[in-house]
Amino acid sequence: MCLDGCAAYRFLNAPDGLRRIPMQAIRIHQYGDRSILRCEEAPEPVLRAHDVLIRVHAAAVNPADCQFRRGDYAAFAPLRFPAILGWDVAGWV
């Protein structure tokens, strides 16, 4: 996952070779309670210098994610919508 809110793509081996399948991501389009969470396809990331692409195997939610979703940090760290929350991941670079 890139820090600017784009999602990684995962790669699957298929009989016809390597296929690219867009990752499903939980995104928000505004601040609010948990009812605003949407499971959607996310666009392919554009990597910049010093970025890495991660094939995510597992992700977690911590209290800061809920605080960002509610807008608790909007005054000093506003989100760009649609946003993908969560920085706690395990996977392959």
Image (cartoon, rainbow, N blue to C red):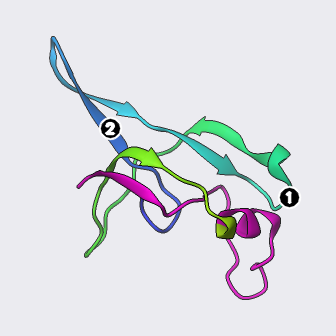
In the figure, 12 relative to 31: above or below? above
Cα distance between the residues tagged 2 and 1 = 29 Å
Q: Amino acid at mark 2?
A: Arg
Q: Is residue 28 visible?
A: yes
Magenta span contains residue 63: no
On-image quarter of the N terminus: bottom left
Magenta span contains residue 72: yes
**In the figure, residue 66 lies in which quadrant?**
bottom right
Name which residue lies at 81% across and 49% down. Answer: 34
The part of the chain drawn in magenta is 65-93
Q: Position of residue 71 (x, y in %)?
A: 80, 71
Which label sits on residue 32? 1
Q: Is residue 80 visible?
A: no
In the figure, 53 relative to 3: above or below? above
Q: Is residue 15 left or right of residue 92?
A: left
- Secondary-structure class at tag 1: loop
Q: Amino acid at mark 1?
A: Gly
Name the residue that disc number 2 marks: 10
Q: Is residue 18 left or right of residue 34?
A: left
Q: Position of residue 58 (x, y in %)?
A: 43, 45
Q: Is residue 13 left or right of residue 82?
A: left
